[in-house]
């Protein structure tokens, strides 16, 4: 075996190669050119084409560089960054993902605005057409009954949309039976039909009938504002019946709603048609709140098809069982229709169509979109009716009524706050405070740096007190 000194004396050029670990020995052997080679073996990562980063790793390993880890040389990091930067496919995919996210967000925003606009315009149109219908036909219960019968069309409309949007081929009877599971495992029976549908149909009829009676006493703006109090009643009933979370801000909103009701009743001195109209509108909001709480209790987990099935079932119940009430009112001369040819069928069909659209948007829209959009659309009906009353009917609003309307609308907006609004607000304020403190610290650092540079320019040196 030849030593290193003998290799140097022989005149041949020594060869030093750095290879990956192949054996546990470190032999020195002659090269094909006659020289010898000292082989340093070590475990290392895979060798790339140029092998530069492997040489750097071994040199750092041999010299005992402090904190060195094999495979994490600067050249490897540069190669990794360059290889990451040289992948145009990843950049393209990231750009496409961000574009799709922006597109989806824009579509959601536009869809939400369209939903709010449709809900508010349909409710404003319904209220104003009712006022126009009363000019030639003053039978509120018959109008309510006639409009409720149109709910039968909701399930056929749903089935038509289902056939167009999906490839699933089901007959209307098969789809109806599938959605009938809402009533139980055995589907809809006569007993379940009456038991489940009767309470909701009665509350539905009372809500619409009281709302129409209130429109005979008050303006459309006042009635729509008072109807917005149903949000406060829903919260109170949900807190009591459904054991929902208690929220102080919603208690404040409920108090504001009650204050607005009292102010609205006080506007004309607690007497006359105004007080009766306020009582009827509050009754309509109360029955609507009870309907929604029961709907949430029994049908809260229903899908879109089951909701459409339930609304059409209520329309059948209204046609079969409640048809006797308009007949009783007719023969008792409480609501006299006259001949069928003299009825304003144009106004009534337009009213029923708008009411059908509103009901579809409210009940089906809650399943498809966010419920807050439906609530905002209902709230925007108040300024919409106010604009129509002011421009078309030349209604003059008193200061008390305007104040009561604003208080009710403000309470309605407070009801829309999410349950975690307080913690979210505190985190947002803490983030703003931290950002301000960081900006202030950066300003102090910049100012101190500027002061030190200016003191060096003046020949003064600050001595640290360490």
Image (spheres, grey):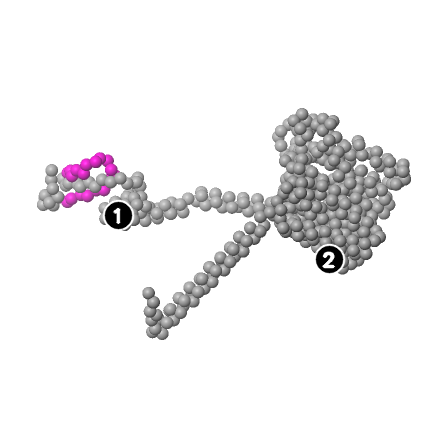
Tag 1, which secondary structure?
helix
Q: Which residue is mark 2?
A: 403
Q: Residue at x 82, y 40 (%)?
A: 141
Which callout, 1 or 2, points to the residue nearer the camera?
A: 2
Report if residue 374 is visible in the image. Answer: no
- Among the 4 quarters of the image, the one containing residue 150: top right
Q: Position of residue 230 (x, y in %)?
A: 71, 46
The answer to the question of whether label 1 and label 2 lie on touching residues, with beta carbons closer than 8 A, is no
Horizontal side of residue 156 vs 440, given as left or right: right
Magenta-tinted stretch: 12-31
Q: Which residue is mark 1?
A: 60
Q: Nearer the viewer, residue 95 or 394?
A: 394
Report if residue 40 is visible in the image. Answer: yes
Tag 2, which secondary structure?
helix
**How far separated are the C-alphas under marks 1 and 2?**
80 Å
Magenta-colored stretch includes residue 26: yes
Q: Residues within 10 Å of mark 1 (few under 14, many from 20)?
A: some
Magenta-colored stretch includes residue 163: no
Q: Position of residue 356 (x, y in %)?
A: 74, 40
- Among the 4 quarters of the image, the one containing residue 34: top left
Q: Position of residue 229 (x, y in %)?
A: 72, 48
Q: Nearer the viewer, residue 161 or 297?
A: 297
Q: Quadrant of the N terminus?
A: top left
First in sequence: mark 1 or mark 2? 1
Q: Residue at x 85, y 44 (%)?
A: 138
Q: Quadrant of the C terminus?
A: bottom left
Q: Residue at x 84, y 52 (%)?
A: 272
Task: Please identify the residue farthest to the top as the structure is shown.
Answer: 186
């Amino acid at each position: 075996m030849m030593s290193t000194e003998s290799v140097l004396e022989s005149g041949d050029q020594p060869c030093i190669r750095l290879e990956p670990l192949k054996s546990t020995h470190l032999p020195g052997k002659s090269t094909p050119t006659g020289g010898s080679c000292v082989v340093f073996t070590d475990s290392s990562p895979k060798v790339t084409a140029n092998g530069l980063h492997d040489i750097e790793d071994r040199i750092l390993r041999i010299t005992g560089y402090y904190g060195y880890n094999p495979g994490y040389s600067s050249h490897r990091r540069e190669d990794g960054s360059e290889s990451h930067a040289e992948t145009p496919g990843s950049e393209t995919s990231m750009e496409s993902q961000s574009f799709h996210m922006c597109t989806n967000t824009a579509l959601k925003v536009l869809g939400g605005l369209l939903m709010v606009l449709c809900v508010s315009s349909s409710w404003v149109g319904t209220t104003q057409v009712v006022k126009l219908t009363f000019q030639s036909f003053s039978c509120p219960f018959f109008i309510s009954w006639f409009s409720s019968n149109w709910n039968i069309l909701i399930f056929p409309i749903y089935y038509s949309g289902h056939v167009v949007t999906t490839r699933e081929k089901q007959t209307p009877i098969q789809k109806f039976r599938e959605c009938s599971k809402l009533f139980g495992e055995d589907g809809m029976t006569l007993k379940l039909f009456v038991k489940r549908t009767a309470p909701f149909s009665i509350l539905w009829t009372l809500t619409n009938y009281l709302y129409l009676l209130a429109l005979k006493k008050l303006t459309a703006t006042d009635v729509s504002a008072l109807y917005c109090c149903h949000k406060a009643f829903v919260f109170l009933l949900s807190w009591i019946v459904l054991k929902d979370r208690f929220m102080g801000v919603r208690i404040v909103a409920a108090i504001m709603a009650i204050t607005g009701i009292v102010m609205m009743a006080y506007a004309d001195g607690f007497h006359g048609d105004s007080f009766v109209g306020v009582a009827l509108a509050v009754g309509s909001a109360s029955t609507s709140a009870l309907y929604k709480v029961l709907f949430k209790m029994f049908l809260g987990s229903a899908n879109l098809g089951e909701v459409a099935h339930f609304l059409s079932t209520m329309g059948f119940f209204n046609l079969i069982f409640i048809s006797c009430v308009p007949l009783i009112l007719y023969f008792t001369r409480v609501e006299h229709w006259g001949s069928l040819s003299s009825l304003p069928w144009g106004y009534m069909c337009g009213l029923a169509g708008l009411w059908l659209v509103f009901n579809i948007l409210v009940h089906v829209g809650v399943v498809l979109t966010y419920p807050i959009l439906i609530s905002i659309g209902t709230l925007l009906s108040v300024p919409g009716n106010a604009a129509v009353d002011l421009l078309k009917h030349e209604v003059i609003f008193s200061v008390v009524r305007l104040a009561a309307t604003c208080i009710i609308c403000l309470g309605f907006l407070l009801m829309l706050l999410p349950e975690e609004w307080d913690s979210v607000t505190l985190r947002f304020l803490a983030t703003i405070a931290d950002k301000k403190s960081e900006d202030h610290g950066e300003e102090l650092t910049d100012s101190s740096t500027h002061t030190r540079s200016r003191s060096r320019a003046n020949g003064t040196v600050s001595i640290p007190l360490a």
